[in-house]
Amino acid sequence: MTDLKETRIQSIGIPRDKASEPTLGIEPIILGERYYSPSFAQSEWDKMWTRVWQIAGRVDQIPTPGDYVCYEIMHESIICIRGEDSLIRAFYNSCQHRGNQLVTAEAGTLAGGEFQCAYHGWRFNDSGECTWAYDEDDFPQGSPCGNANLIEIPCDTWAGFIWFNMDSDCKTLRDWLEPVASHLDTYRMEEMKRTHWVTVEGDWNWKCVQDNFNESYHLPFVHPQTIASMNEHHSGCQFDLYPSGHCRMLMPGGGPGPQYSGSADRTFRSLKQEFDYWEFDPEPYRENLSGLRIALQERKRELAEAKGYDFSRYSDEQLTDHYHYTIFPNVSFSMKPDGCIFLRSAPHPNDPNKCLFDMWYLTMFPNGSKEYYSNSMRDWVSIDHQVEHETGIAGEVSCGPGIDQDVAIWTTQHKGLRSRGYRGEYLPLQERRIRYFHETIDSYLAMDPT
Ligand code: FES
Ligand SMILES: [Fe+2]
């Protein structure tokens, strides 16, 4: 089975208890139509997207009152704004006069602390209250001021992200995220800085992305470099499927698994940058690659403080292993000791055969470092440089090493899913997070629309 053996008793770090397994079906349910049918996409919108917590942006994008971010999903547009009272509130981006959108920018600052509609000039304050209307005394139903206010929806923050939910009866964000929120709090993501921000449009359904990040079965084929540097085989990993619909995967890193039959040189090459950074000599482990992981953990503990890291809240495993969380329905956090790969898919507003895919990298800068070489991104990043949002077409704009390999596969997968010859999934047990993901979607679709 897939339980991971503890290497030592930990009193710090993320709990590694195995979640009890839900009972899943085996008859195919992941049929092609759920990837291309407009009516299926409409059901997802009506019954699922309008009920789940979603991320609008980063808290550090809106440090001062009047700052806002605007996030679009499908045809909807949500404004999250920091008010004079420093609270962040979320509103539908729709004027209560005759519906014009109030803002069109992805982020900005309100002039004079008020929204002013470009159509007939109505004004709304940062609490959503209508404060001014042209010819205010000409409304037989009474003045719009204080009455025709913006429609507010639940909004909260966690880990430096701004979250919203279109369902006014939703669970609290924390309840929704558990147990993931408690696990990931050790990483202090609120102190990380977004240093890469890429959105690409591709020819696949949004679920191809979440399916992909819910399994590691593809690693030897899509990411052949990984077999030399991590224990990607399911026998060495742990998979947890939580009642909330969120999942996680624990995969040992810092060296290959026992099934690896390649050379030590290949392993050393693939981990070279990390070894160099940590001034770690792998040669003593040439004949014993299984010893690399613990030795590297110990080395990181030794040098962490000198290099400006606070690893005091991490277990030893967190220093080398891959802690990969998928948040239902469309977000993945792939945690590193010094950062996080944030991955998100969103449906295209007009076509279920298209998707908007986000890759962000959040960097935890070591104390005192303003410039930092991100091993995960193979790139230098700067704490002072506000990263720009790069957008484009999949394949033309890079989503970073590794992730580009995933991006390349989704187009051909989506085409095959549309074939009359595709008869539904045939999954190994190790891909059960995919089955769970689709069963969770189906449980939303079985509810009445809100
Ligand atoms: S639609 Fe906004 S003021 Fe008329
Ligand atoms: Fe992948």
Image (cartoon, grey):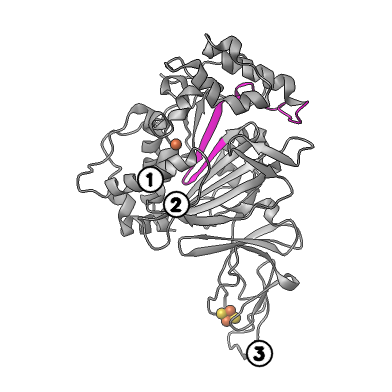
SS assignment at label 1: helix
Q: Kindly report which numbered mark, 1 or 2, lies closer to the viewer in this rendering.
A: 2
Compared across the picture, whether 438 is left or right of 189 comes to: left
Q: Kindly report which numbered mark, 2 or 3, lies closer to the viewer in this rendering.
A: 2
Q: What's the distance in space between the residues labelled 1 and 2, CA to CA?
A: 10 Å
Compared across the picture, whether 291 is left or right of 409 comes to: right
Q: Is the residue marked by circle 2 packed among few (<14), some (14-19), or many (20+) residues within 10 Å? A: many
The kind of residue tagged 2 is Ala
As drawn, the label of residue 84 is none
Q: Find out whether the residues at labels 1 and 2 contact each other: C-beta distance under 8 Å.
A: yes
What is the span of residues highlighted in magenta in the rendered image? Answer: 306-334
Q: Horizontal and vertical percent for residue 31?
A: 27, 45
The kind of residue tagged 3 is Asp
Which of pointers 1 and 2 lies earlier in the amino acid sequence?
A: 2
Say which residue label 1 marks: 410
Q: Horizontal and vertical percent for residue 369?
A: 76, 38
Q: State the residue in front, 406 or 266.
A: 266
As drawn, the label of residue 394 is 2
Q: State the residue in front, 340 or 173.
A: 340
For image coordinates 31% across by 54% down, the residue present is 36
As drawn, the label of residue 137 is 3
